[in-house]
Amino acid sequence: MPPAVTLIVPGHDVALYAAEALESLRAQTRTDWVAILVDDASSDDTGRLFDAAAAHDDRFTVVHHREQRGLGAARNTALDLVRTPFLGFLDADDRLTPSALERLVATVDGSGSDFAVGAYVRLRPDTAGGYEAGSVQPWVAAATDPARRGTTLEEHPAASGNIVAWSKVSRTELWQRTGLRFPVGKAYEDQIVAQQMYTRARAFDVIPDVVVEWRERADGSSITQHKGELPVLRDYLEALSGGLAVLDAAGHSRAAASRVRLILAMDVPPLVEMARDHPDDAYRRALGEFARRLSSRVDGLVLPEAAATALSAARLW
């Protein structure tokens, strides 16, 4: 039986976690998959772990970047090599749940939609030196529960809150037909691509099943743990703005409003707390400029008190 789905697995210096990611692939209840492992010029054992996996299981193929090019470029490298009808993504420090591929591929294959989106949870360090999976967060549930087939952003605007690459399986044809590729040299590179997927798809499906466990690294090296750094903040705000611009350009006003509410509730308040005592005024200015742009979108929106307070504070910087 030819493989049905390709998993694109990029990694840079993730040797501590890559074995778990690869094992979560081997443990899938659906076995007709292949995986393209992209070692983005790692300085640790990531590349050797990838090579060992390929030596023992011919479903794995390895590509090595000679120089580090970033997550977006690593994914783009693999996208050009996909030959299966379906494709998905798994970061090499995360884990798929055992039935993830079975549920996602069967859903999109059965519905005729362009892609399927599942729920995810965060893996956080526990007191014993390991990691413990949390619960599905409200904004994730709002995007994926209840199950829907053949839906669109007009019918389900809250789906726009699921902006990660690795919670989805899509038809390869969608990427070929629309020319989708990831931005290179940017953090949070999947946010804009996710909105492009929603707006360019003829239809998509959502399922409430948890398909990925997303790791928050104990050593603090995850990109999401570096929002206090000005270059990371700028990429983050650019991704948030860029995703909204995609929704605006496609005329999805309800999805854009849903996304604005979520950004104000979930993204802006913690950034404001970091900015209050930040040593660099440029950090506050960047956040203030972003907040002022968002302010033009809040008319008619009902915001939580904490979000409204944070927005008011940020606009003054």
Image (cartoon, rainbow, N blue to C red):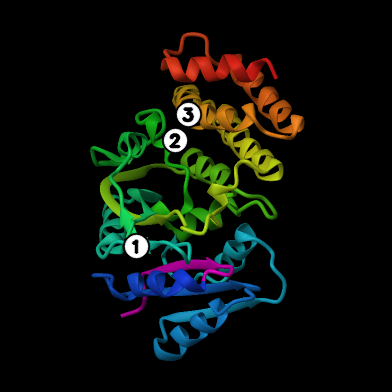
Local secondary structure at mark 1: strand
Tell which residue pokes out farthest to the bottom in this image. Answer: 55
Which residue occupies 75% across, 29% down?
A: 281
In this figure, which residue is indicated by the disc labeled 2? Answer: 160
Q: Which mark is residue 96?
A: 1
Residue 160 is one of the magenta-drawn residues: no
Tell which residue pokes out farthest to the top in this image. Answer: 300
Badge 2 amino acid:
Ser
Crowd around label 2: few <14 · some 14–19 · many ≥20 (10 Å): many
Judge by depth and name the residue closer to the eye, 11 or 79: 11
Judge by depth and name the residue closer to the eye, 107 or 31: 31
First of labels 1, 3 by sequence position: 1
Is 65 drawn above or below residue 150 in the view shown?
below
Is 218 drawn above or below residue 201 in the view shown?
below
Q: Left or right? Give the position of 317 relative to 80.
A: right
In this figure, which residue is indicated by the disc labeled 3? Answer: 259
Q: Which residues are magenta?
A: 1-14
Q: Position of residue 309 (x, y in %)?
A: 51, 15
Is 139 drawn above or below residue 112 in the view shown?
above
Q: Left or right? Give the position of 102 relative to 23.
A: left
Instruction: Give the quadrant of the N terminus.
Output: bottom left
